[in-house]
Amino acid sequence: MITVQHIADLVSGTVIGDKDKEISKLMSLSSADNESVTFIADKKMLSQLQVSKAGLVLLSENVADQFLGNRIVVTNPYLAFAKVSKLFDPEPDVNGIHSTAIVHSTASLGDKVSIGPNAVISADCKIGNGCQIGAGAFIGERTEIGESSRVYPNASLYHDIKVGNHCAIHSGTVIGSHGFGYAPSPEGWEKIAQIGRVIIEDNVEIGANCAVDRGAIGDTVIRKGAIIDNLVHLAHNVEVGENTALAAQVGSAGSTKIGANCMAGGQVGFAGHISVSNKAVFTGQAMVTKSVSEPGTYSSGIPAMDNKVWRKAMVRLRQLESMNQKIKELEKKLKDLKSDD
């Protein structure tokens, strides 16, 4: 049973109301009922809060008087919601080692390791205590996975990969694939062997269907606390700093160093062999072609606009060169007139 007081203890909050009330689910503010917990982090939602039927609301002190039911006052309601959400997570665990799993005799498994159906643990792997390896996952030779990490079904970790503690690698993701390295020759492309590794530090989460290439010579590195959304590609020898967040379809060419506490919105692209300052933020579809040495917010790309407005803008864009020439001619005439005076 989960009580209001239990939740308050978890989020270090102050209870106003019935601390012994039982809560059985988590719901949105608009749909919450008497058995659910919800939260409000935006004053724009005050009208919904005032009529909410929630059994418990997580809120800040400045709006605590706007709800008359059970509530927990916290400093950061959204963070509190994140902590509480784990109490209601229905995700099933992998339990035990399935009879169809293939575990090489030289692999080392820690205590309470679980391995799902048809998963493969290759030679000389080291799987830490409490790890869960999902159905159909592949763990290549000499790969190491730290304690309490989870590899979801059908994810693939190539050879010589190192994953830290408390990490999550979701389905369809490939860690350690070959980087895009080729030398041109008269006969065609000569492949360059990719002999580096991928190093993933503690508390990293990598979403579904990502590709993280192994280093060409050195290592590709994802520092601790980084979070990576679905459909992200990181090329060989990329480094992602601590607590950096990369949204869906971000792509980085090889050998780029992204700093700590950065954020990149959807479809941001990083050119290769550049470095990015700590605490740099890139809005969606920004194209980063040069090194960024200062924290700040950076943007590029063309936001969506009304089709008729966009068509007119494109016509003007095609006229820029001729307009530029006309402006130069006018400037020259004006200069000549002034010199005559």
Image (cartoon, rainbow, N blue to C red):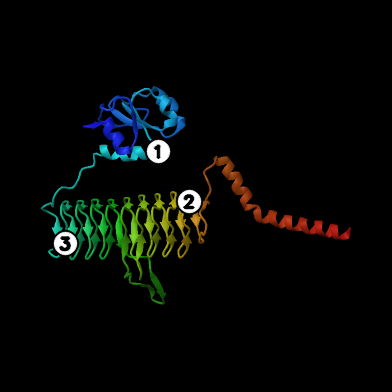
Residue 72 image point, x, y percent: 35, 31
Residue 222 image point, x, y percent: 35, 58
* Amino acid type of the residue tagged 1 in the rendering: Asn
Quarter of the image with the N terminus in it: top left
Pointer 3 local density, CA inside 10 Å: few below 14, some 14–19, many at least 20: some
List the residue tagged with mark 3: 108
* Amino acid type of the residue tagged 3 in the rendering: Ser
List the residue tagged with mark 1: 76
* Amino acid type of the residue tagged 2 in the rendering: Val
List the residue tagged with mark 2: 281
Please tell me which residue is depicted at 31% across the width and 66% down the height of the picture.
Answer: 197
Q: Earlier in the sequence, mark 1 or mark 3?
A: 1
Question: Dot 1: what SS?
Answer: loop
- Compared to 39, does 143 lie above or below? below
Residue 303 image point, x, y percent: 52, 45
Label pair 2/1, CB-CB below 8 angstroms: no
Question: Dot 2: what SS?
Answer: strand
Q: For residue 48, which quarter of the picture?
A: top left
- Compared to 217, does 295 lie above or below? above
Q: CA distance from mark 2 to mark 1?
A: 22 Å
Q: Which mark is residue 213?
A: none
